[in-house]
Amino acid sequence: MIVNLLIKMKKLLYISGILTFFVLMSFMYVDFFSSMTKVDYIDGSKTLKFTTKMNTSHISDAIKINPNTAGFEAEVKKYVNNNFDVFVNGSPKTITFTGSQVSGETVWVYFETGGVSDINTLKIKNTILLSAFPKQINLVNIAYKGSQKTMNFQRGKEVNEVSF
């Protein structure tokens, strides 16, 4: 009888501990800092097209401008040009900003680089939002001639390279 009572008390303490843990976790605020870039190779035009998705408030905080103002797109363009570099087969490529779009909590940024006939190595330096948010993670997914590669960037790992 005492053994059964001890077992029931142990179960009750265990369940109480789990419930307390979940209650405490519900009060915890966690903000997730990330960007995602999709890179597509367009064989006909020998172009790499980049589409980057970022959180609107995060990029707005980083460039210190309201996304609803006229100068937002120009500041995003300058920011991306200063924080994203591409090297194809060891040679630096010029990035051409083609536009951006604010859609609620998301900013889409479009840019490209031309004159890319074949890729043996693709090296990217991606420091987007890394200085503003210490826990920022940037993912880059690359599609090249049927091959898929993924890179990730964070503080201390701002440069990544893949081979095809």
Image (cartoon, rainbow, N blue to C red):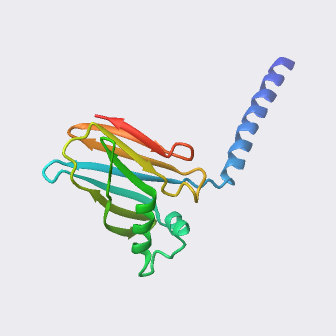
In this view, the residue farthest toward the left is: 44
| Above/below status of 79 relative to 91 | below
131 with respect to 127 (left or right)? right
Q: Residue at x 53, y 46 (%)?
A: 154
Q: How many marks?
A: 0
| Above/below status of 62 relative to 163 | below
How far across and down, in percent of the image, does residue 123 sit? 37, 43
| Above/below status of 163 relative to 152 | above
Q: Which quadrant would the C terminus be assigned to in this image?
A: top left
How far across and down, in percent of the image, does residue 53 sit? 40, 58
Q: Residue at x 54, y 65 (%)?
A: 62
Q: Which quadrant would the N terminus be assigned to in this image?
A: top right
Quarter occupied by residue 12: top right
How far across and down, in percent of the image, does residue 103 sit? 39, 68
In this view, the residue farthest toward the front is: 91
How far across and down, in percent of the image, does residue 58 sit? 53, 63
50 with respect to 134 (left or right)? left
Pick whichever, 60 or 106, lies toward us: 60
Q: Residue at x 12, y 51 (%)?
A: 44
158 with respect to 147 (left or right)? right
Pick whichever, 31 or 86, lies toward us: 86
Pick whichever, 91 or 62, lies toward us: 91
